[in-house]
Each structure stands twice: as structure tokens, then as C-alpha cells.
Image (cartoon, grey):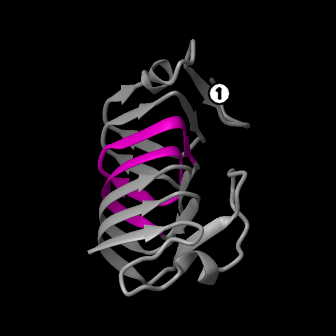
Amino acid sequence: MALTFGRGGKGEGGGDFGASAPSLPTMSSGSGLTAFIDRGSEFEGKLSFKDTVRIDGRFVGEITSENTLIVGESGEIEAKIRSQVVEVSGAVTGDVIATRKLILHKTARLEGNVETAALVIEEGASLNGRLTMAAGAREGRKGTRIEAAEGSNP
């Protein structure tokens, strides 16, 4: 099963998920939330979207985004992820390519290899895997950085 989310986009079954998504605040994206997978929901397959999606349920498969993926505290993801920004508060198992930034909040647990231009890790977050900070170079950026979250020791 493949679902596509975005403004005016259609998923399987012809539903317009962009129009029916709840208006919830996003944590770090500039655009509004276009889809929300709530706690208790389970999806398997390929998820592709253009704007911001928040997952608080369980997802297994592959996720591709042109903007921001937010994994809430109750979110459980087993997937290969490619997005500009990935913000994690829940559990992710699988490789992550975040072309702009990966943010791991204090409740985040990530098991997998990571490629990103910028990394923010709050104290308490868990990252187990190989980290490559080369994504920014492919997009013409001159450097990469690791940011210490507020209240943590660098």
C-alpha cells in the first residue's frame, strides 16, 4: 500500500488527506501540518508527502518527504526515512537521511544509520548507528555542525 500526502494530494481510496488533517501545531517546521497518524493507528507500506506529517502511531515501510517528518512520543517507526527535516520524540528503527537537520528530543530512540547536515540531540536521547554528516555538502553547503541542546553539556 502506498499513501501520498500533500496539499491537494490523494492517497489510496481517493481521500484528500491534506484537507482533513487536524490543525495541530508543528514543532519546528515553517509550513502547517498536512497529515497526522494518531496513536493507535498502524500503517504499512510507502508514505510520500510534500509538507509536514506527524506520526504518533506505528508505521512500517518507507517514508519520503520534501519537508518535515515529526515522530511523536508514542510514534513507532520501522522504516527507511528520507526527508529534509526529521524530528523524533518516539522510536525509530531504520536508516535516516535528513538532508537539512535531524532533531532527537530527550525521549527519542533511534536505531539505524544517519546521514544529515545538522544534528541536534537533547540529553536523554538515544542514537545507535553510524553517523555521516555529508548531506549538506551534496546540497552545496560548506559545512556541517552538531548542536548541543539547551541544558546539555557539549
- The stretch in magenta equals 75-104
Query: Residue placed at 55% from the left, 74% from the top?
Result: 36
Query: Residue placed at 42% from the left, 68% from the top?
Result: 4
Identify residue for label 1.
153
Above/below status of 152 relative to 33: above
Q: Is residue 13 left or right of residue 140?
A: left
Report if residue 13 lies within the magenta region: no
Report if residue 98 lies within the magenta region: yes
Q: Is residue 154 left or right of residue 138?
A: right
Of residues 84 and 118, the one nearer the viewer is 84
Of residues 11 and 100, the one nearer the viewer is 11
Secondary element type, mark 1 = loop
Dividing the picture into quadrants, the one containing residue 35 is: bottom right
**Residue 23 image offset from top left, x and y in percent:** 71, 76
Residue farthest to the top, as pictured: 142
Above/below status of 80 relative to 122: below
Q: Residues within 10 Å of mark 1 (few under 14, many from 20)?
A: few
Of residues 97 and 1, the one nearer the viewer is 1
**Residue 116 image offset from top left, x and y in percent:** 46, 31
Query: Residue placed at 49% from the left, 52% from the top?
Result: 108
- Identity, as a three-letter code, of the amino acid under mark 1: Asn
The quarter in which the N terminus is drawn is: bottom left
Query: Residue placed at 38% from the left, 64% from the top?
Result: 47
Q: Is residue 123 left or right of residue 9?
A: right
Of residues 83 and 89, the one nearer the viewer is 83
Classified by dominant secondary structure, the portion drawn in magenta counts as strand
Can residue 148 be spotted in the picture?
yes
**Residue 84 image offset from top left, x and y in percent:** 52, 42
Can residue 133 be spotted in the picture?
no
Dividing the picture into quadrants, the one containing residue 41 is: bottom left
